Image: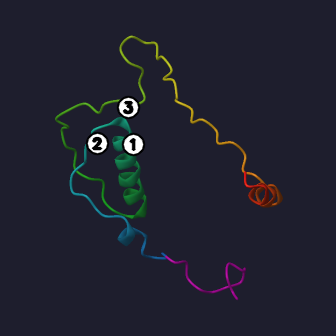
Amino acid sequence: MAGCGGGSNLPASVSGGEAKLIPHVEHAACGQTSYDQAILDKTVEAGVVAGHPRPLPRECPYEPVDIFAAPSGGKVEPVPVPRAKPEPPKKGKVRRVIDKWRGV
């Protein structure tokens, strides 16, 4: 019943072990897209804050691709989304019993 209540002398779930949760990398990693690179950068910075040494620099063999950039034409045309035909409303229980009784 202690939960998150104040006054508890229990340690936090990662108290003193923050650096163990984040893997240490020897060299900097390169992401294929700008999104991948942003995730890698955040993970490395979290490791540095937790106590890991900064990774050694590495030359990336390619430039990360920006997956959110517009095509070279500059204007993005919206793609039409096909809409499903709505189903007719289901008959109520009373209406189904009456139809069954009438033989419809």
Q: Tell me whether the residue at label 1 lies in contact with that at label 2, contact meaning CB atoms closer than 8 angstroms.
A: yes
The residue range painted magenta reads: 1-13
For label 1, the SS is helix
Numbered badge on residue 38:
1
Numbered badge on residue 31:
2
Q: Is residue 55 above or below residue 65?
A: below
Residue projecting furthest to the front: 103
* Residue that appears at 52% across and 30% down: 82
Residue type beneath disc 2:
Gly
The quarter holding residue 4 reads: bottom right
Judging by the rendered image, the residue that carries numbered circle 3 is: 67
* Residue that appears at 25% across and 43% down: 30
Residue projecting furthest to the top: 73
The front one of 12 and 75 is: 75
Category of crowding for the residue at label 1, using alpha-carbon neighbours closer than 10 angstroms: few (below 14), some (14–19), many (at least 20): few
Q: Where's residue 91, x and y in %?
A: 75, 52
Q: Where's residue 95, x and y in %?
A: 81, 55
